[in-house]
Amino acid sequence: MPATGRRALAVWAAAVAVYLLAVFHRTSLGVAGLQAADRFGITAAELGTFTVLQIGVYAAMQVPTGLLVDRFGPRRVLTAAALFMGLGQVLFAVAASYPLALAARAVLGLGDAMTFVSVLRVVAAHYPPRKYAVLSSVTAALGQVGNLLATVPLTFLLSNAGWSSTFAIAGAATAAYSLVVLFRVRDTPDGEQEPREAASLRDVVGQVREAWRVPGTRLGFWVHFSTMFSPGVLGLLWGFPYLVQAQGLSPAAAGSVLSLLVVVAMVTGPVIGQVMGRWPESRVPMVAGFLLAAMVVWAVLLGWPGGVVPRPVAAVAFAVLAVGGPLSGVAFALARDYNPIHRVGTATGVVNVGGFTATTVTALGIGLLIGGDTASAGPSTFRFAFLAVAVVLLLGSWRTLVWWRRARAAVFAAETRGDDVPVRIRRKPWDIPAEQEAAAS
C-alpha cells in the first residue's frame, strides 16, 4: 500500500473509532433498560422517553451537523463529539434522578449526532468516489462492533461492576479518546480545512430546501426511514425487554439473540457495500426485497399463537431484521449520486434524519402502548405494543415505492432534455415506461 494510502487508512481508522464509540453509547440502554426502570422508578412510557429524547436530539442535529462539518471540518466536530458523549455517559453514571438522567441522554445524543456525517466526510475527502459506497458500508459495519460491545459484554459488566462504575468508565474513556482524534484525524489529505464563513439563515434554509426538492434525496430519506428503524428500535431499547419479558429468555440468552443484530450487520454490511458499488441499479430492489421480508417477519412475530415464538424463530427473525441496518446505507449513496458535490453534506444530513425519526416515533409508540410497569408486561402486551412497528413499516414502504418511481421519472426527464446524468443513476431496462413514470409524479 502506498504511503498516501496508509495515511488515509490511519485517518479513517481514527475517525471510525469515534463512530464505534457512538454506537456503543447509543445502544447501551438496550441491555440496561430494565435496570434503568428499576433505578429511576419509572414506567414503560418514561423508559421509552430515554430513547425518544436521545434519538430525537440525534435527528434534529443532522442538518446542523452537516453545516458544522462544512464550516469547521470533521476533525473539530469529531473531537467535540467524543467530549460530549463522554460527558453525557459520566452524567448518566452518577444521575440519581430521572430528570438528570434525561439530561445526560440528551448530551449523549448531541455527541452521537456529530459522528456519522463527519466520518462520511472524512471518507469523501480521503478516498475516490468509486470507493465511497464500499467504505461507508464498512464504516457502518465496524460501528456495529460498538453495538456488539453493548450486548453481552455490557450485560456482564453491569452485573459485576455495577451501574455507576460501568458507565463512568465508558464515559471517561470516550472523553480521553478526543485527544487521539485531535492529533490523528485530518480534514483533507493536505491537512486542515480552513473554516468557512458562517452562512446566513436564509442561505441555510435555501440549501436544505434545494436538497429536499431533489427526488433522489427524498427517496434516500424514505429508504433510511423504512430500513433502519426495526433493528434500531430492537437494539436501542425494546429488543431486550421483549425477549426477557415476552419470550421468557434469560438475560444472557436474550443478549445472545440481540447480538445477532450486530453480527449479521457486520457480516452483510461489506457485502452490500460491494454490491452497491459494482451494481448501483440493484440498490433500491435490494431495499424492496428487505421490506417484503421484514413484513413477513413481523407478521410471524405478531401473529404467532400465544405470542411466545420458539427461540430459533426469534433468532431467525432478529437476523433478518438486522440486514436493515447495512441496507440503510443505500440512502447515503442515493444522496451522493443525486446531488451536486457542494450539497452532498446537507443532503446526507437530511437523509440521515429519516431512520432516526422512524426510530423515535416507534420507540415512543411502543412505550405508550405498553403503558405501566415494563417488568409486568407479558406476551400479549408486547404483541399489542409492537403494532407500532407494523404501522411505521407500512408507511415507510409505501413512501419508498412512491419516491422510487418519482426519482426515476426525474432521471428520465433529465435524459430527455439532454442533461448530464451520472452513469450510476441512469435508467435501466427494467425501469417503468415513461408514461407510467409521469403518472407517478
Image (tube, rainbow, N blue to C red):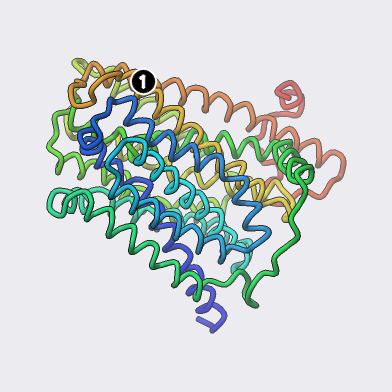
**Residue lying at the far bottom of the rendered structure:** 3
Q: Amino acid at mark 1?
A: Leu
**Picture residue at 23% right of the left edge, 16% below the top:** 380
99 vs 112: above or below: above
In the rendering, at what x and y percent does residue 107 appear?
Answer: 44, 47
**Picture residue at 64% right of the left edge, 35% below the top:** 218
**Residue lying at the far right of the rendered structure:** 417
**Picture residue at 72% right of the left edge, 29% below the top:** 433
Quadrant location of the C terminus in the rendered image: top right
- Residue bearing the label numbered 1: 368
In the rendering, at what x and y percent does residue 5 appear?
Answer: 54, 77
Q: Is residue 313 visible?
A: no
Q: Nearer the viewer, residue 99 or 58?
A: 99
In the rendering, at what x and y percent does residue 66 appear?
Answer: 62, 51
Q: Is residue 184 visible?
A: yes
Q: Nearer the viewer, residue 221 or 299?
A: 221
Q: Quadrant of residue 180?
A: bottom left
In the rendering, at what x and y percent does residue 358 appear?
Answer: 48, 31
**Picture residue at 56% right of the left edge, 44% below the top:** 61
- Left or right of residue 197: residue 8: left
- Secondary structure type for disc 1: helix
Q: Nearer the viewer, residue 241 or 267?
A: 241
Count neighbours of disc 1 (C-alpha within 10 A) and say few if under 14, some if 14 to 19, many if 20 or more. some
Q: Nearer the viewer, residue 241 or 8?
A: 241
